[in-house]
Amino acid sequence: MDHPDTAPTVGAVIERLKRQFTEHGVASPAEDARILTGGLLGLDLTALIVHADRPVSDDDEARISAAANRRCCGEPVHRILGARGFFGLDIRLSEATLEPRPDTETLVETALPLAREAVARTGGCSILDLGTGSGAIGLALLTGVGAATGVATDISAVALRTARLNAGRLGLADRFETVESDWFAAVSGTFDLIVSNPPYIPSGEIAGLEPEVRNFDPRWALDGGADGLDAYRAIARGAAGHLRSGGQLVLETGFDQHAAVIRLFDDCGFACRARVRDLGGRDRVLVLAPADEG
Ligand SMILES: C[S@@+](CC[C@H](N)C(=O)[O-])C[C@H]1O[C@@H](n2cnc3c(N)ncnc32)[C@H](O)[C@@H]1O
């Protein structure tokens, strides 16, 4: 065991990782070095600065080195840590779940006021999260709206197990139900809000994605079929039968898919109520409702 005076400090370990990541061509070496070291030592970014001179034990250094080697082989930092922050929540990941993206917070920000309106109107809000993965969207909405209840679906039973684990850790299990389902196939009942971030990458574009995405996010969470729109077709076909009066859909799309998705829903009797851009200024979220309720 290193003597505390000779053991590397937190700051020195971060610097070493930064150099190692730079040599291996990791895209954001400094950020990844901080996230990985902080995540493994249980220190947030402020604590990393405050405790920069703290010695790192042999065991911790070995864990950090092993994790750094995985990062150099292309594994994303949050996959290595098995968790990522989403809308202020600590969301656990598994091999069956997509790593939730910051862009998806735009969907949550769009849906939250609609959920609160439903509560103001009816005293509650039932939310259906289609393709929930880790549960990130549904759980963020339930955290923000105490009177809401959620049903979360996925085609992957393993993803649903992770979503339930997250619901339990966040104290939301009593308002969060999961259903294994191919879109609406096993869903019963009607909802005030239907939310979804479905797979929307055209199949032919998967091979050209960044290796971090292509090799670590599950393919079925990314692949939207030949034109990327298969999931929207299924959701458009089934939505009318599962929306309450005054209900709305809030959907994430690819940055160039708004017009095509609006057309698909128009064919099924829905009108677009809002188009929302993400923080990068790209089209990202659609709000849709039955055209005859306009
Ligand atoms: C883009 S990921 C989104 C995951 C999560 N909602 C998020 O935003 O991080 C799409 C999700 O849809 C699920 N999925 C794929 N095909 C499905 C289907 N036919 N029926 C239901 N869910 C499906 C995947 O398992 C995955 O969890």
Image (cartoon, rainbow, N blue to C red):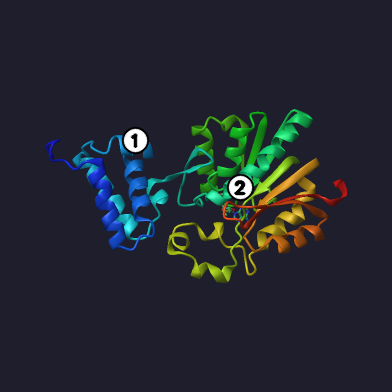
Quadrant position of residue 149: top right
Q: Which one is in front, 228 or 109? A: 109
Q: Which one is in front, 165 or 55? A: 55
Instruction: In the rendered view, tell whether residue 257 sits above or below residue 114.
Output: below
- In the picture, measured across the screen, residue 142 lies left or right of residue 191, that is left
Question: In this figure, which residue is indicated by the disc labeled 1?
Answer: 47
Where is the N terminus found, in terms of image quarters?
top left
Residue at 56% across, 32% down: 173
Residue 133 is at least partly visible in this image: yes
- In the picture, measured across the screen, residue 49 lies left or right of residue 163, that is left
Question: How far across and down, in percent of the image, does residue 35 sit?
Answer: 37, 46
Question: How far across and down, in percent of the image, does residue 82 sit?
Answer: 41, 46
**Element under label 1?**
helix
- In the picture, measured across the screen, residue 91 lies left or right of residue 235, that is left
Question: How far across and down, in percent of the image, does residue 159 sit?
Answer: 52, 48
> What is the three-letter code of the residue carrying label 1?
Ala
